[in-house]
Amino acid sequence: MIMTTRNQTQEGLEAITATRPLLTPESVCYHLAELFKVRPTEVGLLQMQGAVLRFVFPRELAHVGSIPLNSNAVAARIARTQRAELFNDFVKVPHWSIFESVRLHDAEKTAPMVIQKLMSAPIVARSGVVVGVLQISRKGATRQEAGPDFGADDLQRLKLAAAQIAPIMLLLTVPDQMPRQKLSFCNQAAEQKRV
């Protein structure tokens, strides 16, 4: 069963990378949402920029602020230690809740939901340098409403997804650096053709 799950993760991300020369953070995160059976806004993709992490998805969080690597934020700890972690009782974990208060595009008519469960994995380049953090959450008013707990198999799939994303993270543009351009993941062949 684990082999099928690993193959699905790898094949799915490779397929969208191979079939689309221009990938957006949205397309990658929507695929991950389907894979983990969560809403797209329960997927978080952060990029390393110097000594801080910035959200690139959900897009609304890109302009809220950045997370210093020397902070006690979960994403910062994941980047520093280069270890994936899961929390099935995330509300009890000390974390930065400012990002949870932002109204996201799929929840315009409802109050922001609390992250009840969270998995987080570092995105590490082949050189060993952390280039980002990938997070999958389950939100709801209560733990039960948020859905099933994450397990060891889920965390393993998240690590595999982070490894698949690593090569394309290096080609990512961040919203406020290029305000009028669409964010994009580009595979290297497409990038070289444009140069």
Image: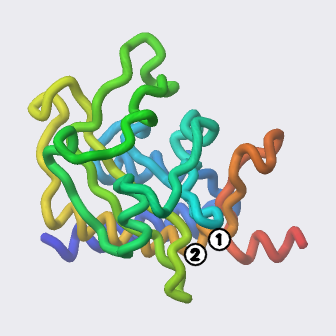
User: What's the residue at 17%, 42% (across, down)?
Assistant: 92
The reply, left or right, for residue 26 in relation to residue 87 is right
**Is residue 134 among the parts visible in the rendering?**
no
Estimate the x, y position of residue 181 in percent, counting from the top left: 80, 45
Q: Which residue is mark 2?
A: 167
Residue type at tag 1: Leu
Residue found at the far top of this picture: 109
Colouring used for the render: rainbow
Q: How many marks?
A: 2
Instruction: Name the side, left or right, on which 149 lies relative to 180.
Output: left
Quarter containing the N terminus: bottom left
Question: Do the residues under discs 1 and 2 have CB atoms within 8 angstroms?
Answer: yes
Secondary structure at numbered mark 1: loop
Label at residue 193: none
Residue wearing tag 1? 170
Residue with the most extreme bottom position: 127
Q: Residue at x 53, y 61 (%)?
A: 16
Q: Is residue 90 above or below residue 7?
A: above
Q: CA distance from mark 1 to mark 2?
A: 6 Å
Can residue 154 be seen here? The reply is: yes
Image position of 152 (left or right of 62): left
- The amino acid sitting under disc 2 is Pro
